Amino acid sequence: MSDKNKAIWVSRVMCDSTLIKAFESNKLFEDAECAVDARRRNKMGEPLPADRFPTEIYGAYPDKRLKRQPDIFNAGGYWAVSAEVANILR
């Protein structure tokens, strides 16, 4: 990519408290200590293997029906994005 075509993308999305949602992950139920360690390391930006991340995320309030979530949101400590946002980030 030439210098002419380089761009920088800046966002404050991670500072938006309305995007923090009360979800729990399968990793937390399987091994809470490992899940907390993975969240901490992920937040510090440490590269982690895929198996340290959840494969399922559950609503924290089982008696409430979940509404459609935003295209990017924090799901119990993990950032989740829609397929559309994932394509943009790639």
Image: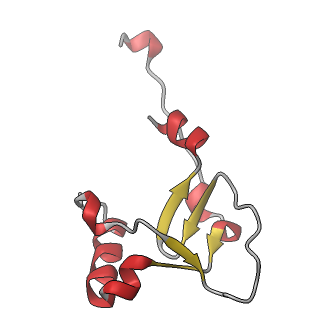
**Colouring convention used in this rendered image of the protein:** secondary structure
64 displayed left or right of 33: right
Q: Nearer the viewer, residue 38 or 29?
A: 29
> In the rendered view of the protein, which quadrant contains the C terminus?
top left
From this view, report whether residue 47 is shown above or below residue 82.
below
- Residue 16 drawn at (x, y percent): 65, 64
Residue 64 locus on image (x, y percent): 76, 84
Hey, which quadrant is residue 37 in on the image? bottom left
Residue sitting at 61 percent across and 80 percent down?
Answer: 22
Q: Quadrant of residue 44?
A: bottom left
Viewer-nearest residue: 37 or 6: 37
Query: How many badges with numbers are in the image?
Result: 0
> Which residue occupies 46% across, 13% down?
5
Q: Nearer the viewer, residue 89 or 26?
A: 26
Quadrant of the image occupied by residue 51: bottom left
Left or right: where 18 falls relative to 25: right
Q: Is residue 12 above or below residue 19?
A: above
Which residue is located at x 36 percent, y 10 percent?
2
Say which quadrant the N terminus sits in. top left
Residue 65 x %, y %: 76, 77
Q: Residue at x 55, y 70 (%)?
A: 75
Vertical placement of residue 19 versus 34, above or below: above
